[in-house]
Image (cartoon, rainbow, N blue to C red):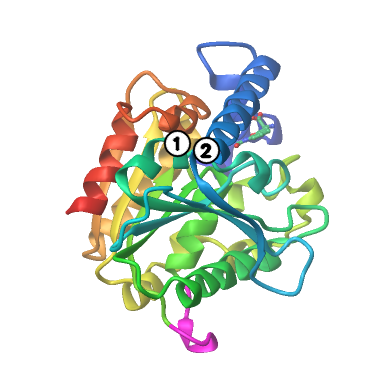
Amino acid sequence: MDWTKMTKDELERQYSPSRWSHRMNADAVIQAHVKALKAGTERARALAQTLLNVPYGEGDGEKLDVYIPKTNCLDLNLVIYIHGGYWQFLSKEESGFLAVPLLDKGVVVVAVGYDIAPKGHMDLMVSQVRRSVVSVVQQYSHIRGLYLCGHSAGAHLAAMVLSTDWSQYSLNPQIKGAFLVSGIYDLLPILPTYINEPLKMTEEVAVRNSPSRLVPQLQQSSPGCQILVAVAENDSPEFRKQSEEYYATLSAAGLKVTLEDVPDTDHFSVVDQMVDPEYCLTKLLMKMMNS
Ligand SMILES: N[C@@H](CC(=O)c1ccccc1NC=O)C(=O)O
């Protein structure tokens, strides 16, 4: 069904990922997700050489964590991870888990912090993640390749980074690949829902921050970027449609994009399993970096 024909209740159901898990009830699945992210981040902090709370701007929330392989080799790839949580939950403190499988393979992982709502608003969060990428490129200019990975609201923010008009910034980061996991690319359907209560987006804000409408800018800014749009098999029909439609738009624009429908996953397990080096998305990310 077209979202414009849905009631507020139905939209809220479609945009409540925890209600669609086949593993657990809504509260339990979120709890398990946060627990898995925290445990993974703790492991990563033990395994890596870390630089925590590195500022990328003046604001209190404008800090990032760097996870560096202990066996220092030259020619490293770097992945910037942008956490999810509907622009109002989670932080970089539980967002280092992706380093667990990648450190061994000589990949630096950066977990970006940004000001979630109600402190932050959509334009600010988008500006923060863009500036964090510029700052990482300035700091690590010698790296082999720069990649982005984002989950849920973080996939939205990563897609907004790809669609940046860099003429406003001090440099143009060459992003080699982007891993967009269970993202939202059109913000209009969430305007009438509870998700927008702390965000307070107007239609104008939602329109200018919807990656689905910024594909021409992406084509200009990131024409060679390899993009993987991944969605969980058990994501809600609306979430699945968000990924399918964004993939189709990118593909029609001639971009290098693939759609990955990840079997036997829900909105949360689709990303928290990335601590496992044998998980299909972890392998695909490694493959992207080695291609
Ligand atoms: N109300 C949302 C909550 C949610 O999405 C969420 C909550 C805590 C941490 C992460 C979340 N979502 C995505 O990462 C839900 O029903 O799943």
Amino acid type, label 2: Ala
Q: Which percent across, then down, holds residue 88?
A: 73, 46
| 3, 139: nearer the viewer | 139
Q: Which residue is mark 2?
A: 44
Q: Residues within 10 Å of mark 1 (few under 14, many from 20)?
A: many
Asked if residue 87 shows in the view, the reply is: yes
Q: Is residue 167 magenta?
A: yes
- Residue at x 78%, y 56% (from the top left corner): 200
Q: Is mark 1 within 8 Å of ligand 1?
A: no
Instruction: Give the side of residue 10 with respect to residue 196, left or right.
Output: left
| 232, 130: nearer the viewer | 130
Instruction: Give the side of residue 103 with respect to residue 285, left or right.
Output: right
Q: Which residue is mark 1?
A: 100
The quarter of the rendering in which ligand 1 is drawn is top right
Q: Residues within 10 Å of mark 2 (few under 14, many from 20)?
A: many
Q: Which percent across, then down, holds residue 51?
A: 59, 56
Q: Identify the magenta region.
A: 164-171
Q: Which percent across, then down, holds residue 281?
A: 33, 35
Q: Which percent across, then down, holds residue 216?
A: 37, 73
